Image (tube, rainbow, N blue to C red):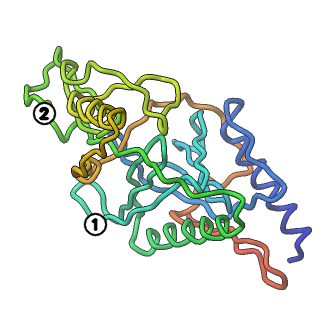
Amino acid sequence: MDKVTFMSENRERIQALESSFGPSGRPLYKPDRVLVGQGHLMKQGQRRTEMKAFFLFNDILVYGSMILNGRWHKKVKIIPLEDLQLEDMEDSVRLTNQWLIRTPSKSFFVSASSHEDKRAWMDHIEECRAKMLQGGSCQPGSTFAVSWIPDKAAYKCMRCFNKFTPTNRRHHCRQCGFVVCHSCSSTRVVIGHIHPKKKLRVCRLCHKRNTEEETSRVSGDSPGNSSSVEDIVTSSSGEEDEDEVMPSSRLNSHVGTWGEIGTYTPHTALLLPPSYT
């Protein structure tokens, strides 16, 4: 397949993907952007684990929720590869073949249907990210959001240890990801890498640490190297449900966990995703 034919088919695939997310979707096509692969992964959320459709490009990772008959939810999620970090994880009771995807604004766990699919996803993402960073046009991210502990993992506040009830509800500290009560998370601060303007809920311990560090900076002292709460958070952040929109008939809704589309190389055939029933 020659380069002109490859790029033409690549453009058609990307435009079909754009339309599948409906009018609320965001433009995905760029002249130098290539759709490398696609497939389904289980994404662990705050309240439940859901199947998501993921699409790997040479510069971004895109995902959205799929339901019956290829119909799609709104609000496509786009992660620039320079702002992405992967961390391999061992199997848990809730998820097998899992790994952690870290981004500045959100971090979450995903799970593949097999170890081979997991390695394919992780290897392809890392390869695309490495090639993009080699160009020197962008710099890798250095600050990432913690993952949230799921609601079901805590029946008590992880700060004051009071039990949760219908009136004493669960909340999440945006800085450490712990499940806490309202009394222990009444303070709100700006966390720049998550949201540069909006004040977000933090627990009393994180607020105390922030205050102490700020005081140390003002006085010229170096803050202590205490262990970070990020090191002991082991679950994922959630997201709100999204409304359904009509799908594009040009996208195959039965693609397996990893379907390689490929990148253009002279004198090689386009690698199409395998067909599944």
Foreground of the two, 176 or 258: 176
SS type, badge 2: loop
The correct choice, above or below, for 60 with respect to 256 in the image is: above
Hey, what amino acid is under mark 1? Glu
SS type, badge 1: loop
Give me the disc on residue 115: none
Q: Which residue is mark 2?
A: 155
Q: At 19% across and 41% down in the image, what residue appears?
A: 153
The correct choice, above or below, for 78 with respect to 210 in the image is: below
Between the C-alphas of marks 1 and 2, the distance is 24 Å
Within-10-Å neighbours for mark 2: few <14, some 14–19, many 20+: some
Hey, what amino acid is under mark 2? Tyr
Give the side of residue 122 with respect to residue 81, left or right: left
Q: Which residue is mark 1?
A: 90
Give the side of residue 214 with respect to residue 41, left or right: left
The correct choice, above or below, for 49 with respect to 242 in the image is: below
Location of residue 142 in the rendering, given as x and y in whole percent from the top left corner:
49, 53
Location of residue 116 in the rendering, given as x and y in whole percent from the top left corner:
44, 75
Q: Please, which residue is most extreme toward the right here?
A: 4
Foreground of the two, 36 or 138: 138
Upstream in sequence: badge 1 or badge 2: 1
Give the side of residue 173 with respect to residue 191, left or right: left
Q: At 35% across and 34% down in the image, what residue appears?
A: 174
In which image quadrant can residue 72 be found? top right
